[in-house]
Image: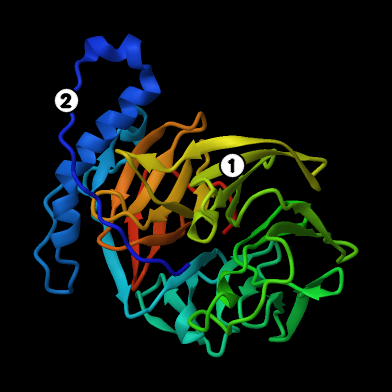
Amino acid sequence: MNMPEPRLHAKHIEMNCNDLPKIGRRSFLTAAAAATITTAATQAQTRDFGKNAPPVRYPDADIVALDKRFAKYKIGNTPIQRIYQGTLWAEGPAWSGAGRYLVWSDIPNDRQLRWLEEDGHVSVFRKPAGYSNGNTFDYEGRELSCEHDNRRVVRYEHTGKVTVLADKWEGKPLNAPNDIVVHPDGGIWFSDPGYGIVGNYEGHKADLLLKEAVYRIDPKSGKMEKVLDEMFKPNGLCFSPDYKKLYIADTGASHYEKAPRNIMIYEVVDATKLAKGREYVSMELGGKAGFADGIRADVDGNIWVGAGWVGAGYDGVHVFSPDGVRIGQILLPEICSNVCFGGTKRNRLFMTGSQSLYAVYVETQGAHIS
């Protein structure tokens, strides 16, 4: 996603708890959150993440609890770490449990990088990589990737062969597949908002020939079906822990004036279709609304959201409870495009910033395999 970064203007907020019945709990929490992040914004922007940086005083002030429900997920004696720097636009983190490594995309440099849990070593995993964006792993441990430039979804076989899973819909080339998730039945779901062809930076400029949509690839027949095309630009995808719901981030406001800045939630019907869509959360906070990009669920059903395009005090990770209340934030000095749970215990949150890869331990686990 390419767009100018607006600035967050801090506002002083005074709130008396006696006003709660008048404004409602959710409104109060939103206002309180804005006040809380204002105090932390300066630290996130000026913090030194370099190798020779002084140690962080615990608890890390950039891990912010906005609601008491977030307290149990915040570890008091662990810091946010920058574990790699040097990408242009990092995206698509995916954890390989068998390989004990994280793979992610550096889209403009047309490469995938790999971080090894054993010693933190980072190397170029694939180049060229079709200007890949989203990545994940299926239940057989094979990597799946959304390629912007080739306008397709591929699977990397254990033999090294590349299998094309989807590249056309009704005879027309896909726009530029973006994010991808796998259902336990083997079905592969992916979004196709088209960011990879709106310019030459993340692929090659071309015309969008299809309405932006979400598709499903059947695991047995390989047949592709469109499951949704009512959103402006469906982007990040995430199943609930029980796979009965699908969350979809809409980033259409990057190109459509009337598009919302929100995350939608749909019921998954028969593991193949979507129904009863409604807004799960708005990304508005303190009078400013950024974008939700990549999203992941933890085992308790909280949704961890890569967010940005507002500025200090907003950019980073926003954490929402199952009922749609923003309960916490992890503030970063960069826009956070995407997140992924990983590590041996799946209790480490990896965050792709614009030019960096960050990680922090949390007291929960990812709900899914990658």
Is residue 48 in sight in this rendering? yes
**Is 187 displayed left or right of 336 in the figure?**
right
The C terminus, quarter of image = bottom right
Q: Which residue is disc 1 drawn over? A: 264
- Residue 10 drawn at (x, y percent): 18, 44
- Residue 94 drawn at (x, y percent): 53, 65
The image quarter in which residue 268 lies: top right
Most distant residue in the bottom direction: 128
Q: Which residue is disc 2 drawn over? A: 14
Closer-to-camera residue (12/137): 12
Which residue does the image show at 57% across and 67% down from the upper left? Answer: 134
| Above or below for 22 versus 342 | above
**Is 224 displayed left or right of 62 in the figure?**
right
Most distant residue in the right direction: 221
Most distant residue in the front direction: 257
| Above or below for 105 versus 284 | below
The image quarter in which residue 69 lies: top left
- What SS does tag 1 mark? strand
Residues packed near mark 2 inside 10 Å, few (<14), some (14 to 19) or many (20 plus)? few
- Residue 3 drawn at (x, y percent): 41, 66
Which residue does the image show at 39% across and 51% down from the upper left? Answer: 290
- What SS does tag 2 mark? loop
- Residue 169 drawn at (x, y percent): 82, 68
Residue type highlighted by circle 1: Met
Closer-to-camera residue (93/152): 152
Dot placed on the residue nearer the N-terminal end, 1 or 2:
2
> How far is mark 1 from mark 2, CA to CA?
31 Å
Closer-to-camera residue (165/354): 354
How many numbered marks are there? 2
| CB within 8 Å, label 1 to label 2 | no
How is the structure coloured here? rainbow
**Is 122 displayed left or right of 40 in the figure?**
right
